[in-house]
Image (cartoon, grey):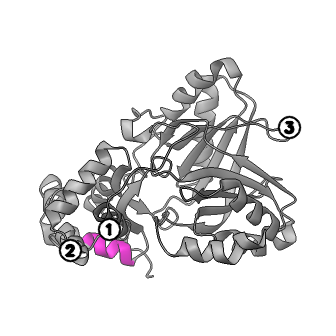
Amino acid sequence: MTTPAPLDDLDQRLLNALQWDFPLVSAPFAELAARLGTDEADVIARIDRTKQEGILRQLSAIFDTRTMGFGSALVAAKIDPDRIDDAAAVISAHPGVTHNYKRNHEFNLWYTLATPPGDSFDEHLDVLHRDSGATVTRKLPTLKLYKIGVKLDMTGKTAADAKAAVAPHESPERREEMPAPELSDTEYAVISAVQGDLPLTPLPFDALGSTIGLTGAQVLETLESFKARSLMRRFAAVMNHRTAGFKANAMGVWAVPEAHLDDIGRQMAGFASVSHCYRRPTYEDWPYSVFTMVHGRSARDCEATIDAIRTETGIEEHALLWSVKEYKKTRLQYFTPDWDEWRAAHLATI
């Protein structure tokens, strides 16, 4: 990974487009070029450069974990600070752990865990609790999803108190029981292909299709069906936050009165700098019911957004948890052999 070169205006607008509105068409880079006033080769070259520099992590399908029938939850753990790195390594080895962070709190290790259809989420979590040596592990599933969608404004023009409408794909339905969808062999093959990085060629979906015996048009048709069934939220770029200039991320957690949860949750989700907003359960040692993730170019940016939320909503009881170390950040890989390998190594030993 090289030291990133400064991003010019076109780079910034391109990276925004890749995150916010990637075109699902046969020649997407040509369409992006037409929108941005350049040519296809320039778009491909700029994307390749930002990938090589570590600014852009991946360009791929973003599936909805729960609609795909997977169990999932945010997990908070209390770990002996002297062995937190070892504990994090144990947890990160699980194929369903996509995010794993050390935070500045008594609950000092936070991770997201997903488990495949038919598996017991609690069985997996029990293993991670035991093998990590956590003294306390709290399961924090989504009770209500108000917003999910990381969109880093690379132009730097979004104010701390700026608002943005929450798009339908950013607030997908959540029910306690969400059965796995019926998928054909072709659909499994397409999922396998599009969850990897999109090839940087003029006809990338043709290139993906050729690896699984389909045409590009068939791949795109399948992706549109995934969107219609809410299996796929969008096709988009994921940025490396820190390399992209967003060096701070903070989790604002709020003790919201029960009677006002939905109104306040939606209000908080309307802040443009909030990428995730959820209602989650509370415990005796955890009174916070609404979670807001904020990314900023500095700690001051994050604090400004949290302060704007506090001022507008009037919710005073809150905490701001900072990410102080990133152990893992990746996309969930669906239906891969890693799951069988992890089960064989761990579940039989409970």
Residue occupying image coordinates x 49% and y 51%: 69
Helix, strand or loop at label 3? It is loop
Residue 221 left/right relative to 150: left
User: Where residue 72 appears, x then y in whole percent?
Assistant: 59, 51
Please name which of the two marks, 2 or 3, marks the residue nearer to the observer.
Answer: 2
Residue that protrudes farthest toward the bottom in the picture: 1
Position above or below: 309 against 22: above
User: Where residue 265 appears, x then y in whole percent?
Assistant: 57, 29
Cβ–Cβ under 8 Å for marks 2 and 1: yes
Position above or below: 314 against 234: above
Please tell me how crowded label 3 is: few (under 14), some (14-19), or many (20+) other residues with Cα within 10 Å.
few
| Earlier-in-chain disc, 1 versus 3 | 1
| Earlier-in-chain disc, 2 versus 3 | 2
Residue 316 left/right relative to 297: right
Q: Quadrant of the C terminus?
A: bottom right
Residue placed under numbered mark 1 in the picture: 189
Cα distance, mark 2 to mark 3?
Answer: 54 Å
Helix, strand or loop at label 1? It is helix
Cα distance, mark 1 to mark 3?
Answer: 45 Å
Residue placed under numbered mark 2 in the picture: 213
Residue occupying image coordinates x 41% and y 54%: 63
Asked whether 234 or 165 is in front, the reply is 234
Q: Quadrant of residue 347?
A: bottom right
Asked whether 126 or 148 is in front, the reply is 126
Please name which of the two marks, 1 or 3, marks the residue nearer to the observer.
Answer: 1
Q: Amino acid at mark 3?
A: Glu
User: Where residue 240 appears, x then y in whole percent?
Assistant: 47, 65
Please tell me how crowded label 1 is: few (under 14), some (14-19), or many (20+) other residues with Cα within 10 Å.
some
Residue placed under numbered mark 3 in the picture: 284
Cβ–Cβ under 8 Å for marks 2 and 3: no
The residue stretch that appears in magenta = 46-52
Magenta residue check for 238: no
